[in-house]
Image (tube, rainbow, N blue to C red):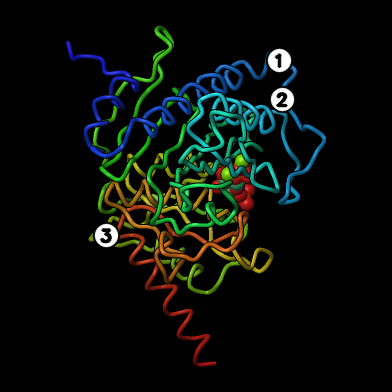
Amino acid sequence: MTKTITLGQFIIERQADFPYAKGELSRLLRDIGIAAKIVNREVNKAGLMDILGQAGSTNIQGESQQKLDVYADQQFIAALKSGGECCIVASEENEEIIRLDSDISKNAKYIVAIDPLDGSSNIDVNVPVGTIFSIYRRRTASGPATLHDVLQKGTEQVAAGYIIYGSSTMLVYTTGKGVNGFTLDPSIGEFCLSHPNLKIPETGTLYSINEGNYVHFPQGVKDYIKYCQVEDAATRRPYASRYIGSMVADIHRNLIKGGIFIYPVTSSAPNGKLRLVYECNPMAFIIEQAGGKATNGSSRILDLDVYELHQRAPIFIGSKAMVSVAEQFMQNTYERIRQN
Ligand SMILES: O=P(O)(O)OC[C@H]1O[C@](O)(COP(=O)(O)O)[C@@H](O)[C@@H]1O
Ligand SMILES: [Mg+2]
Ligand SMILES: [Mg+2]
């Protein structure tokens, strides 16, 4: 029988990877794991409780908040506050950064950016949803941390991860030394190592994009979709189209099976839909660490300048070979635009 390694044990073992760290990051990851279990409990029984449906409010993006968006947001913030290792939380659900200025957290080293519930419009119909998080070290060593500490490039992330509340609940994270996945064992209430050293296949046969928006896509994306649909034995085309509509679930599937996920600019969303700080950057960090690739069509996601908390970016992410081909199609679009 193989030995069970819980998330807590794994984090302690991996502490040796950071000889100069004092254990704060490990504690922070554990706090996120605890909040994830609480949110998982509610997501699992959502249909039985009065927590489905809309909260009656809108967030900064003008999207109507689901009750579970609000609940998940509160749980993660509460866990980070009581843990004491995080000084600022930046969340999809809050227009401004949240300073955790209790005595224990105000001088903490870390910033957490979070999408508390990703794909939440799917919650009422029992489709997988997720949580995405990204961790930065604050830039300034003393004094109150500010928005300036949050607006860092994706390359500065010290850790990132996601939780998928699916047919089983998993927590997948990286600290820049590979990617590991843990499945929640409900019988002991612990995340247990189930997917050590995850690697995304170099190529795959799945493409994920909301094709309902086809007419609004740039020509390069339209051409790439056609390419995916054309028969070619050498590249195992036509590819299968798979789109759940929860970024975490779509990318998780492609991480395991190989594939590409695209949310491009559209005529109605000229900067793309997904948010750079708490959706694109953490997922890009994870996928790169698993051997994949993430770009906005021409530049690496992790190298993009961050100038706004809720900034959006188009994203092409997944198996390296597939993302490179999609990028070539986008390059042709840019060429055409330049020539006209
Ligand atoms: O419905 P669309 O336009 O395809 O958008 C789906 C995308 O929007 C999201 O739901 C946005 O995330 P939130 O639910 O956290 O706002 C992604 O998870 C998903 O990939
Ligand atoms: Mg999201
Ligand atoms: Mg969300």
Viewer-side residue, 197 vs 128: 197
Question: Tag 2: Cα neighbours inside 10 Å, few (<14), some, or many (≥20)?
Answer: some
Cα distance between the residues tagged 1 and 3: 47 Å
Judge whether residue 215 can be spotted in this image. Answer: no
Residue mark closest to the camera, 2 vs 3: 2
Q: Identify the residue position indicated by label 1 in the image.
A: 49
Secondary structure category for the residue under label 2: loop
Dot label at residue 9: none
203 to the left or right of 29: left
The residue carrying mark 3 is: 235
Q: Furthest-top residue in view?
A: 187
* Percent position of residue 69, x then y: 66, 33
The amino acid type of the residue labelled 2 equals Leu
- Three-letter code, disc 1: Met
Q: Is residue 121 left or right of residue 196?
A: right
Q: Which numbered dot is residue 52?
A: 2
Q: Residue at x 54, y 61 (%)?
A: 313
Q: Residues within 10 Å of mark 3 (few under 14, many from 20)?
A: few
Residue at coordinates 68% horizontally, 48% vertically from top-left?
96
Mark 1 is surrounded, within 10 Å at the Cα level, by few (under 14), some (14 to 19) or many (20 or more) other residues, namely few
Which residue is at 52% across, 53% downward? 149
Q: Position of residue 196 (x, y in %)?
A: 25, 31
* Residue at the limit of the structure toward the left, as seen here: 1
